Structures are given as structure tokens and as C-alpha cells.
Amino acid sequence: MEKSNDSSEYGFILEGFSDRPRLEMVLFIVNFTLYSVAVLGNITIILVCILDPRLHTPMYFFLANLSFLDLCFSTSCIPQMLVNLWGPDKTISYAGCVVQLFSFLSIGSVECILLAVMAYDRYAAVCKPLHYMVIMHPQLCVRLMAVAWGVGLANAIIMSPLAMTLPRCGRRRINHFLCELPALIKMACVDARPVEMLSFTLAILIVLLPLTLILVSYGYIAAAVLRIKSAAGRWKAFNTCSSHLTVVSLFYGSIIYMYMQPGNSSSQDQGKFLTLFYNLVTPMLNPLIYTLRNKEMKGALKKVCGRH
């Protein structure tokens, strides 16, 4: 390919919301505020889980990892988007695009699996309370996180080179605010169906399989809760799972809704806002959900703040 067509030399242009200049400043202010809250909230969750010995349990180990993933997920694309929203320059370097795509694929995959692991943790807590610490021992927790990261990195290592090396015949404009896999595949000037099929197959394994495990876990949890005779016991069991179930609904709901939309212009605009939702709004809401609905987390937060 000629150098004039080589995106590795010139990078890409993220069109994003450039067709709506009045909306860009509003989005900059809103996104900067939400991103600041997301960073502060997730760092707080991580520090509290580390500093308070009472939170050195499997549930909060996974929660700290979720906050770390959310922090990385937002940071991989939101700062670049803020730069593009602020001024007329909408470009991103080829290396920056590679980093965004790799982060998006790997961290998103890890989070999908982590949410399934957290569902299994809640299943053990509700359905096997007497054996909970035996089942969820520290070595198992570390191994489960290692598997999640291994799958996420493998997905990114497979798909990133395939997407970035597709011939584009000089096309540099990405109809998105980040280097997302579907947007990069659409830029190809050759038949990219094999890459799309591979992406679809991996998505079934990484997105739908963990979701199935989550639904099965909560099926067992619901059956166990219905067997509890006391209202206080049922409420305690519900409170144990409600935060995680809310996070799962937000994360998976936005992803599934976005990928079920038809490929027209209105759905592309919806796709941008939905991508923004699970890249920014969900990471911002997760710390609030776990803090406001969790007595142990609120108590630990007060203790750490009071100590300092």
C-alpha cells in the first residue's frame, strides 16, 4: 500500500460528535464531570478495600478488581475524547488507536468474566453460607482473576492485530469517538466477514457465556431466598446480591441493547451514546451503588476518612 494510504503514518480521525459542534461543549462539561467522579469513586473503593482489614474478603477483593477495571476502562478512551471535544483537532495517532482498541477488548472481556465470578461468589454466600470461606478461599480467588485476565488478554491479542491490519485504502475517518472494533472493521475496503465472524464467535464465548452463568447463579440464589422463612433473612440475602445485580443489569443491558440495533444512522448515534454509557456512566455509578447500598463499605469509608 502507498504511504499516502498508510494510516500507521497519519493516524485516524475520530469523527465522534463533530457533526454537532454545539453538542460538543455540553458533552465536554458533562463527560469531564462524570469522569472525575468515576476516577475519584473507583480510587476510593480500591483504597478502602486495601486499608480496612475487615474488607479483606473475597467479595471486596473482587470489588476492588472491578473498580480497577472500571478505572482503566474509562481512562483508556475518555481523556482522548475530552481532547477531541475541546478543540478542532479530532485526530488520534495510530499507536493511540492500537492502545484504545487493545484496552477496550481486554478490559471489557475481563469485566464480563469478573461479573460472572462475582455472581458465583454471591451464590456461595447465599446458598452455601457455612462453607463460604472454604469454597471461596484466597487461592481460588486469585486463580479466577488470573483466568479472567488471561481470557481478556487472549481476546485482545487475537482481535487487535486482525482489526488494525485490515486494508483501508486511505480511509482514516472513524465514525465514533474511540477506536472500537466494529467501527474499525467497517472502514475496511476488503471483505472483512471472516474477521466479523471470529469477533462474533469470541463475543458469544466472552459475553453470552458469562451472562448465562450469572443467570444460573441468580436462579439458584432466588430459589434459596424463597426457602428462607423470615422476612429479615430474605432481606439480608437480597441486600447481599442487589448491588451486584444492579451493576450487571447496567453493564450487560447497555451492551446487549447496542449490538441488537440495526445498522442505520440513528442506531449509530445511539451506539455512540451507549458506548459512552458503559465506558463512563457505568464506571461512575458502580462505586455509588456499592457504597450507598452496602453498610460494611459505608462503615469502612467513615473509618478510613476519620483515621486520616
Image (spheres, rainbow, N blue to C red):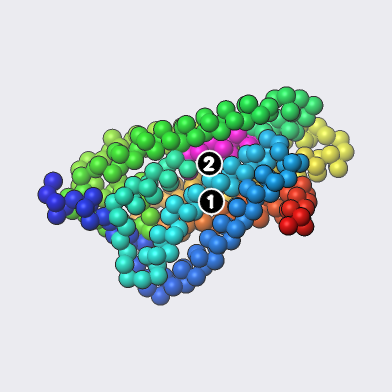
- As drawn, is 98 to the left or to the right of 206? left
Crowding near the residue tagged with mark 2, few <14, some 14–19, many ≥20 C-alpha atoms within 10 Å: many
In the rendering, at what x and y percent does residue 62 appear?
63, 39
What amino acid type is highlighted by mark number 2?
Answer: Glu
In the rendering, at what x and y percent does residue 301 appear?
73, 53
The residue at the far left in this view is 2
Which residue is located at x 29 percent, y 38 percent?
162
- As drawn, is 13 to the left or to the right of 297? left
Mark 1 falls on what kind of element? helix
Which residue is located at x 49 percent, y 49 percent?
73
**Residue 241 in view:** yes
Q: Main secondary structure of the magenta part?
A: helix
109 is within the stretch colored magenta: yes
Going from the N terminus, do you reach mark 2 or mark 1 first? Answer: 1
Total residue callouts: 2
Instruction: Check disc 2 and report the residue beneath it.
Output: 111
Q: Nearer the viewer, residue 222 or 141?
A: 141
The residue at the far bottom in this view is 22
Instruction: Check disc 1 and report the residue beneath it.
Output: 71
Which residue is located at x 12 percent, y 49 percent?
2
In magenta, the rendered stretch is: 108-119
Marks 2 and 1 sit apart, C-alpha to C-alpha, by 12 Å
**Residue 216 in view:** no
Q: Which mark identifies residue 237?
A: none
Q: Nearer the viewer, residue 302 or 224?
A: 302
**Label 2 with label 1: CB-CB less than 8 Å:** no
In the rendering, at what x and y percent does residue 281 appear?
55, 57
